[in-house]
Amino acid sequence: MTDLRRTRVTSSLGPSSVLTRVDTSSCRLVVENTVSKGNVAELVAGREILVGADTGAGLQIEDPTVSREHAKFTRTDGGARIVDLGSTNGTFYERSRVTDIVVPFGSTVMVGRARVKVVPHETEVQTEPSDAANFGALVGRDMRMRQMFSLLADVAPTDATVVIEGETGTGKELVASALHEYSERKTKPFVVFDCSAVPHDLVESSLFGHIKGSFTGATANRQGAFKRAHGGTIFLDEIGELPLDLQPKLLRAIESRTIQMVGGDGYERVDVRVVAATNRNLKQEVRAGRFREDLYYRLAVVRIVLPSLRERSDDIELLVEHFLRQDLSEGQVPLKVDPGSWAALRDYPWPGNVRELKNLAMRARSLSRGQDMVKLQDFIQRDEVSDFVGLKKAGDTPAPVELGEAAVDVVAAVTRALDLSNGLSFRDAKTAVIEAFERQYLQDLIGQAEGNISRAAQQAQMDRKHLRELLKKNGLWQGEANS
């Protein structure tokens, strides 16, 4: 069995999937403040690093609050062990003074007044594409999809935690389901928990359960999602929406594989595999302070970023044929598609991604009224994409704003969001509109600023660093030349 306990993959916007491994034998200790900011020490398995003000320390920190021999750090699987050496001002983790503790990757430890972060190494390797055009319910011939199929085949039999990122409708839950289906846990429960669908004050109870009388309305003991998934897989959908104050409790549950019910006085062991999904970029959420870095590294042992349908438009014909064959009664012939449809479908921006394409295929099958062959573009809401662009016609009042190419996505996303017949949930429709708006706004903003990040940030009234990250996310970052 392939050991992928510290494996992550990124496969979003590049020409191919990228497999990124987190090195299990070493990590870095990085000083984040004081005059020693930027000092780094390599922490290798089997060796310890002395941290202190002494010039002979493995990680020297020049600060009056740091003792000469303040603490020693030792590499552990998934983090570092820290032993305070009787320092004057102490070593702190999570605002508590510690003498001997093991912390996970991404943790920040206070050594006196100095912040020291434990950061894992990540190395990228290419994955060979699978020969198959499917994995479980996932379908695709695109190179990135077949690379992902190959990775999933290796990861599924392990208990590695997985984070799946991607736009709404790209198939994140199908990936999670396939991981469970091809694992040794496939006969055990697959429990889905949507972090965005539960009120804040009920998330902890819904995840870990509660004891009767522990809060108003708790009229009986109740098992949480972790307990219901015992022996199987828990899928934490929209993990980016999990409140920041509850993230340490989730980290503790994943690290220790134990849970404490709300109102309970003890911990109970659970055996679960954790798979999480989000339509956000979690690394950006970490940088923005909305997601804990230690929880990110614990979840993202394997990280998969699903490409949008726009990025793999050559798969459209394969997907449509797959959807039209689904759930046919015995002897029923699949609906035939006019060959002229494919070019129109490839040109459409698909704000709802594969989910929207499936809805289109199902709508065509339901409304074809016995036709042997249909033009699928006729079943796109509001017909052709060109109708959305706002092109000037004879007799029309000139538009006050000339819409750029990316505005097709914006207008189409709004149109789709307001069309309740397409099956999009409120959250999915809202997300698609926001993502399309963000791409267009940033493109126009950086163009007007002639590539000058500082000028663009001032105009948008946002932090320059945050703007740069948004530009990178949307493929608009051109490097440091005009920063």
Image (cartoon, rainbow, N blue to C red):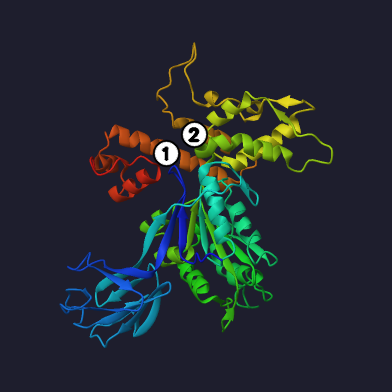
Q: Residue 403, how many percent across, how many down?
A: 42, 27
* Residue in the picture at 20% in, 82% down: 67
Q: Is residue 135 left or right of residue 445?
A: right
Q: Residue 332, how many percent across, how many down?
A: 82, 36
Q: Which mark is residue 31?
A: none
Q: Are marks 1 and 2 in contact (CB under 8 Å)?
A: yes
Q: Residue 119, how many percent across, how many down?
A: 35, 66
Q: Is residue 183 left or right of residue 312?
A: right
State which quarter of the image contains the N terminus: bottom right
Which kind of residue does numbered mark 2 sit on? Asp
- Quick one: SS at disc 2? helix
* Residue in the picture at 58% in, 37% down: 315
Name the residue tied to disc 1. Answer: 439
* Disc with the residue nearer the chain's start (1 vs 2): 2
Choose between 59 and 17: the one closer to the eye. 17
Q: Is residue 411 visible?
A: yes
Residue 155 location, quadrant: bottom right
Is residue 192 placed above or below 310 in the rendered structure? below
Q: Is residue 417 left or right of residue 68?
A: right
Name the residue tied to disc 2. Answer: 409
State which quarter of the image contains the C terminus: top left
Furthest-top residue in this view: 394
Marks 1/2: CA distance?
9 Å
- How packed is label 2: few (under 14 Cα within 10 Å), some, or many (20 or more)? many
Choose between 20 and 235: the one closer to the eye. 20
Which kind of residue does numbered mark 1 sit on? Arg
Furthest-bottom residue in this view: 86
Q: Is residue 418 visible?
A: no
